Amino acid sequence: MEWANSKQITDEQKVVLKTLAEHVGKPSLKFLEVGNWLGESTLVLAEVAKRHFGKLYCVDWWKGNPGTELESIAAKEDIFSLFWQRICVEGFQDVVVPIRGSSDSAAEILKEQVFDLIFIDGDHRYEQTLRDIKNYASFVKPNGGILCGHDCEGYIADFDENFLNKGKNIDCHETVHCGVVLAVGSVFNNYSINYSIWSTICEPGKRTWLPTDLIYQNLPELKQGPPPLLGISDNFKIFRFGKQVFAVPENIRDFDITQEHTTASPDVIISETLDQLEDLIGERIWVSSESPMLLSSYRGFNLVKYKEHIYALHESIGPLDLTLTTEPEIKQFKKSGKCFLENSLDAVKEKIDSSIPILVEENYRKFNIVFYRGKYIAVAQDLGKISDWTRFDFKAHEESFKCFVGDSHVEVLRQIDQMSLSILEKAIEEKEFELKKSLNENKLKNSRIASLEKQIEADSKVLETFKKKEIPGSSEN
Ligand SMILES: C[S@@+](CC[C@H](N)C(=O)[O-])C[C@H]1O[C@@H](n2cnc3c(N)ncnc32)[C@H](O)[C@@H]1O
């Protein structure tokens, strides 16, 4: 379980969180944390809560953040059980109150509650972060309660606005949680940021938010700690800090961007975008999250995470290197129903579900009706079982009346009826034609018989006459 050891919160952030919690510490306090995962930050808050005989409410659906590695881990592991096990082992089972569900629905349940501190670390995308902040802000005690959250690497002004907008709908873009930076900055005028933890305090007596401005023991004053590695090239390590990206030569070991970003060594190459930086260093940069990762398979599709998207690739495509696949190729796969592209595992599975045919009616005039990719399809039973719908040649079968496609069940039944009717009409037409032909032939036969009879009669008469008028010489016979 290598993933279980990956850190969600740094030691410096634990100090910041603990200091914020202590600031509102008093007997029977109440804290709330939105987004707990395996409980690293939960343990920090729970410890303070326990010391003050208080409670910590924990809101999470424990299925990870849409479109992230956490989501793929949660698809295979029971994260809630692991979380609760940890809480119990640490002796906080009487302090922590888990609320399992979406942060939106939990906000409905918690409507009547008031909290001394609320820490938000759930979905990091812009819309949901904004909703979480707005929903939960009103539950903070008006007399000096604290509202704070994780993963805010700076103020809006610290970044290029286009960069923030580009990344606001994904969890993390080039190591920056753009959605959080934008959402916090759009709700509050004044707030503190320490080691990417943003915090505001409700001014006693008023419902206005002020920066917490606390002093953190033994911590240098920093908005953001050293950023994680963004990528690598052959000879450089790549980082983003604020508006700039840095290529730091492999051999420089102790370069601290948080201290030296303004006076960087001449060997460190700085630019504003990764593309420009690639040009400057003359090397291809590999961004950490860029290699495709096979997550699982689902109903004949391989689910692969690549560049913040989840790709569902049908098994019939065979092995495919997404790093080498072109845009038109993906388009072609999508068109044939062999590929879906979404931002989360749930969304891509939903797409697959709606792409697998569902039997709607069996044996209607020797056709089966299925619902497939938003259409009703009638397939002639004599085509047998269709094992791969992505290869089914609708056009050819439509042309030979073995398949009908429509927007509703009734529409395809009508098409089958029409076809059966026209086959019947044609058959009758053909029979009538046959009949006419036979009748005509009979008529012909009859008139021939009549004329033959007439001829025979005439010939017989001639014969009689012949017999009466003896032919000279005939009596000798
Ligand atoms: C980054 S993790 C939290 C990490 C945790 N605070 C820590 O420091 O250890 C985010 C958590 O938010 C949860 N989450 C994301 N979106 C959510 C939503 N809309 N409703 C409820 N939980 C959500 C995920 O399941 C995940 O456990």
Image: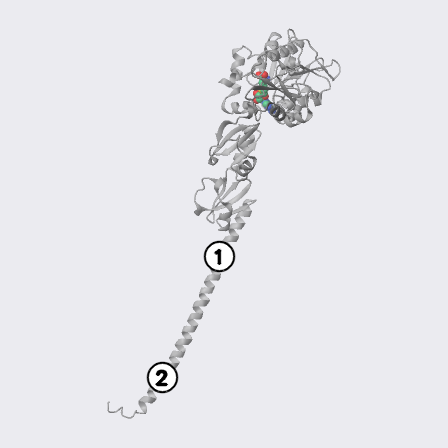
Q: Say which of marks 2 and 1 sits in front.
A: 2
Question: Which of the 4 image quadrants contains residue 67?
Answer: top right
Q: Toward the viewer: 29 or 77?
A: 77
Split into 4 quadrants, where in the image is the C terminus? Answer: bottom left
Could you say whether the residue bearing mark 1 is in a helix, strand or loop? helix
Q: Toward the viewer: 207 or 244?
A: 244
**Residue marked by disc 1:** 424
Residue located 49% across and 56% down the image: 423
* 466 vs 321: above or below: below
* 352 vs 437: above or below: above
Identity of the amino acid at label 1? Leu
Report if residue 63 is visible in the image: no
User: Callout 2 environment at 10 Å: few (<14), some (14 to 19), or many (20+)?
Assistant: few
Label 2 with label 1: CB-CB less than 8 Å: no
**Residue marked by disc 2:** 459
Question: Which of the 4 image quadrants contains residue 308?
Answer: top right
